[in-house]
Image (cartoon, rainbow, N blue to C red):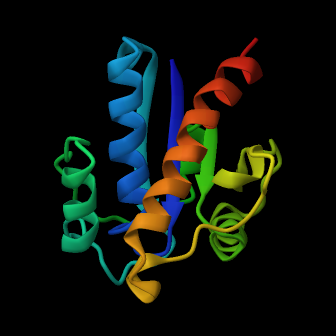
């Protein structure tokens, strides 16, 4: 089983969207039994909150089923629980490594580092651009599925 964690700042927009999107992708491909997918934030300020309403609206608009979600903070123990830790931006990578006390196994990276155009996924909570965030997350999740499969071989 492949264990994937998506990480952003508060776990109410980008990482929550990525969890829903990746879960949908693996289910549509009949691979859901091979994956455990979760998400967390590097901050505790949104702990217990659901998906941000604008993020939920975007997912619904695109036909992506919403998961039961409550924001939570990333913990040191998560490092050993997950095989791949995909962060939305460099700030999240740096914070995750600080929480984990390093990244000895090279598990932590930006989600879009695996694309031909490595970049951060801008936080739509600040930008208001949920269309761009959604498109970037879908691009990353589609490629992450291939990346995870290749890395496991």
Q: How many marks?
A: 0
Instruction: Say whether residue 118 is left or right of residue 23.
Output: right
Residue at 62% across, 36% down: 144
Image spot of residue 108 (x, y percent)? 71, 52
Vertical placement of residue 29 versus 117, above or below: above
Instruction: Say whether residue 64 is left or right of residue 152.
Output: left
Could one spot residue 152 in this view of the protein? yes
Could one spot residue 74 in this view of the protein? no
Vertical placement of residue 147 versus 125, above or below: above
Judging depth in this view, the residue of 76 and 62 nearest the camera is: 62
Residue at 36% across, 68% down: 13
Image spot of residue 124 (x, y percent)? 43, 77
Judging depth in this view, the residue of 143 and 95 nearest the camera is: 143
The part of the image, by quadrant, that contains residue 64 is top left
Image spot of residue 42 (x, y percent)? 51, 72
Residue at 42% across, 14% down: 31
Vertical placement of residue 42 versus 3, above or below: below
The part of the image, by quadrant, that contains residue 128 is bottom left
Judging depth in this view, the residue of 85 and 56 nearest the camera is: 56
Residue at 28% across, 66% down: 55
Look at the image and tell me in which quarter the C terminus lies.
top right
Image spot of residue 127 (x, y percent)? 46, 86
Instruction: Say whether residue 8 is left or right of residue 12.
Output: right
Judging depth in this view, the residue of 58 and 113 nearest the camera is: 58
**Among all residues in the image, which is located at the extreme bottom?**
126
């Amino acid at each position: 089983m492949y264990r994937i964690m998506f990480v952003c700042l508060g776990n109410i927009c980008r990482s929550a969207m990525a969890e829903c999107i990746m879960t949908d992708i693996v289910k549509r491909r009949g691979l859901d039994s091979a994956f455990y997918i979760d998400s967390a934030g590097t901050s505790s300020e949104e702990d217990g909150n659901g998906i941000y309403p604008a993020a939920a609206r975007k997912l619904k608009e695109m036909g992506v089923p919403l998961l039961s979600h409550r924001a939570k903070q990333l913990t040191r123990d998560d490092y050993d629980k997950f095989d791949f830790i995909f962060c939305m931006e460099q700030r999240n990578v740096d914070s995750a490594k600080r929480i984990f006390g390093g990244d000895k196994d090279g598990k932590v990276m930006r989600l879009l580092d695996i694309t031909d155009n490595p970049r951060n996924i801008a936080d739509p909570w600040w930008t208001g651009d949920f269309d761009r965030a959604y498109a970037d997350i879908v691009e990353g999740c589609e490629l992450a599925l291939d990346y995870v499969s290749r890395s496991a071989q």
